Amino acid sequence: MHHEDLDTGAGDAIRLPAPPPTPPRPAIPLLTAVVPVIGAVVLWRLTGSVYSLWFAALGPVLAIAGFADGLRGSRRVARRARRQAATELAAIDAALAERHADERRRAWARTPDVAGYCAAPDEIWRQVPGREEVVVVGRGSARSAVRVDGEPHDDAARAVRRRARLLEDAPVAVPLRAGIAVCGPAPAAAAVARALALQVCLAHPPGRVRVVGAGERDADALPARLPQREAAGGATLLVAPHGRTVPVDVDIPIVRVADGAPPPPRCAAVLTLTGPGRARLEHGGATREIRVEAVSAGQALTVADELAARAAQLGQRIDGAVAFADLPAAAPSAESLATWIGSSGGEAVVVDLVADGPHAVVIGVTGSGKSELLTTWVAGMCRGRSAREVSFLLVDFKGGRTFDALAGLPHVAGVLTDLDDAEALRAVQSLRAEIRHRERVLAEAGAREIGDDPGILSRLVIVVDEYAALVAAHPGLHELFGDIAARGRALGMHLVLASQRAAGSFRDAVLANAPLRIALRVTDAADSRAVLGTDEAAHLPGAPSARGVAFVRRAADSAALRVRVARCAPGDLAAVAGSAPTAERARAPWLPALPALVPLSRVAEPGRIALGLVDEPEHQRQPALLLPGVVAAAGGADAAVGGASGGDAVGACGGFAVVGASGSGRTTLLRTVAAQHPRVVWVPADPEGAWDALAAVDAAPGGTALLVDDADVIAGRLPAEYAAEWLARLERAAREARGRGMLVVVAAARVSGALSRTIELLPARALLPLASRADHVAAGGESADYAGDQPPGRGRWGRRLVQFAMPDAPPAGAAFPAAVPGSARGAAQGAGPSAVPDAVPGAVPGAAGGAAPGLLRFWRPGRTPTALVLPPGVSAERFAVGGVRLSTVDEAAASAGPAGATAAGTGSAAPGTGSAAAPGTVVWGTPEAWLGQWRLLATMRAAGDVVIAAECAPEYRSLTGRRELPPYASPGADRAWLLRPGGDVARVVLTR
């Protein structure tokens, strides 16, 4: 068989030749031996010649000769068969060598080493099946794919079969991510490790593999010019010297290990150098000898330069740093917000928020480059455009530093941060008014959308960093942003919402209207799928070099585009600001925050009571807060306030409550009301004055303003029974306020107990700053409205934020509470001990519901007989002046005769009373002494006055026989109650 007759197809098996046939043994020619013998015998018989018998010897001779000749021919055939078999095996061996050479060539072509790539540069970075998942560690024997059929019949055939099973000088590979440890002398091990790493870089372009780790000063390090060092994505390749820890996030570790040191557990393949170019490979539980490749540092630099040139030629450095200044400026257009944000494949990437949007969603974990992306994007949209074309509202809810650099651009209407949560919230809420404003402008122009009349409105871009934190703190904003997302395209309002995660951040109303999606690195594949539809963003590396790498998917894109975002330097922003056609700043879509101090003159209106300035960001206005109804100068006692009808009078509103902590501005608000009302009853803070003021309210004319400050404090200063009665009177005043045209204003630090019933009767409530959110809610406010660290006078009127006004000057008669008629303290300040009037002006009701008023007096003994009740330990000797006769209860009882009674209506003593009821007599004693002489007490009550010191309040009812409460008198202040026969009780001041 000739070599050319063999089938050497790569997929066909080689068949061993069949064993040569064994030649048959030649048969012994019996007839040849027998026939001559028979002929010789016959001839002898016929001739009788003895010589004829010699012919019989020819038979055996011929038989032996014929057998010998046959044996010789068989041997010749066997030799010819052996030669033919050897020829066939030689042809098979040649075919096998050719098959192995072809298989070796294809194996090295599929998985070349560094020398192979250098010999065939076109193979660099080519995608070849089987190449991407392995790394060639050396040359050695490998199992051949050549198949040999047939059974070997001799040693030569068996040797051919053995050679067919093994492919010598074949590439020996291990999995790419197995991890390789190179053990041996440092220079040789470093050269081998360098060759393995360069092989990986030659097989995988930047973006599929990125080099991390040491710089060029380390002997094991790869050249800095390798384009894979600039890659921000792909599997991480680390070449580590001996002793360096392999990070857990390294995908392809190649580690040099010193002689005798154990390899790192991360390395599944171990190469131990055994000589020049030779090593022992241990992997997968097997050990084999191989020849290894080594690359010097100089050769590595040459390879790195070649790869860098190739990357630049093929545009493979998509992950290299990009400067904002290197990006071209988009042509400004009123119908477009196109701008370049970075590069991909060596080309600049343009994003148009109008054409690709109208809204965008951006996700990325902390450190992924969201802030840089937003800064570059905003700066790009500003470049070459004026504030009349586009303006920005920037909201940063992750600490307040993201947009600091952008604040100086004239296009930026404002930068809001969570450092001033309340201001940020009100500005965002102002967008509701901005929506209505834009709708109104478009309607007046007869345009359906902003594109129908370019230039009529500037486009407003709302950029929110940490959108999830914003809506988590204020869930009500979900609805607002959903509304903007739905109507923003026509109105020229665009959203760029950035968050760390997509899950739980963006509702369907936003996502459905935000086809422009950008995803930087995320840790959860579900977030990547929610935004991009793929897991690609979850596979981005977290190394610093990968910061700013993002996937962009526009409305027209069938797949996400990988982009390296450009970095915008401070100088770039200055250039952007200078490129604006005009220096005019953008109009802010919200009003300034309420001032900390609002003078009454700013909000006052004639005939109205103004309380302060209201902040209505949703309407972009700050009107004055006015009470319903009108008020004018006081008229007659029965006239309605200002002469208006009851329904138009300010008192028709019934009044309001003021709740706030100490120093929150409660008293100032009441003074503001008092400064605008002509008829005020201000309930003073001292218990006696507070009691008297409420007692006098029933007689107050219609249209009076009743102002009660610190109602809870006043109630707390009164004894329980008095406090209950005082609060009941206050409650009655609040209940009857509308009917009487009165304005009732009650201020307290907290709402609790019986006072809460009065507060609930008042139709409105002003909530000033309180100590905690719980206090704010307990006072009737909404939890979401609570804000700490508010200035005095800042509060809520319902849900509206108000800065309550401060009066420009104290109101007339504002020496509160001295202006309250009938005030015990006011009277005391107006009269001294030498003044002893029978009465001072100002009626004070002495009984709950009593019709007749008592009189406030400065009491000293006179001609009327008096029973004086003093607490134990107090003497009446100080009253023994001017001929007054003093006697104790016991003395008066001892000197009295049989029990008698005073003649009704005569004022003279009945028989038996002795001198106790004589004119000018003062009988004094403790409550116990008087109750022990009740007949004497009854006589004195009937014949003269009874004066009971305020300290004897517990025995008041027992001593007087009256159930109603007397006017409140402060114990320990020389206060007492004066009872006259047939009259009401009055509070008096005991003179000294």
Image (spheres, rainbow, N blue to C red):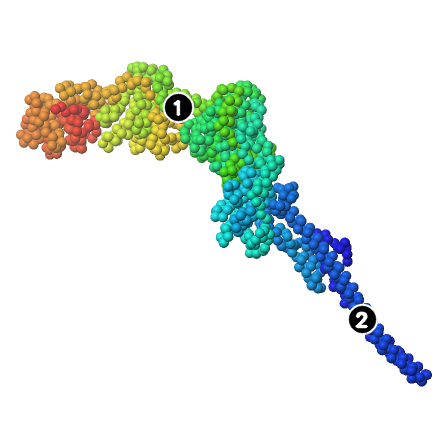
Which of pointers 1 and 2 lies earlier in the amino acid sequence?
Answer: 2
Name the front one of labels 1 and 2. Answer: 2
Which numbered marker is on residue 594?
A: 1
Q: Amino acid at mark 2?
A: Leu
* Quadrant where the C terminus is found in the figure: top left
Residue 142 x, y percent position in the rendering: 63, 54
901 or 789, nearer to the observer: 789
As helix, strand or loop, the secondary structure at mark 1 comes to: loop
Image quadrant of residue 347?
Answer: top right
Q: Nearer the viewer, residue 222 or 123?
A: 222
Q: Is residue 619 visible?
A: no
Q: Amino acid at mark 1?
A: Leu
Instruction: Give the Cα distance between marks 1 and 2.
Output: 130 Å
- At 36% from the left and 31% from the top, the residue drawn is 788
Q: Which residue is under mark 2?
A: 71
Q: Are marks 1 and 2 in contact (CB under 8 Å)?
A: no
Compared to residue 368, the image places residue 805 above or below, namely: above
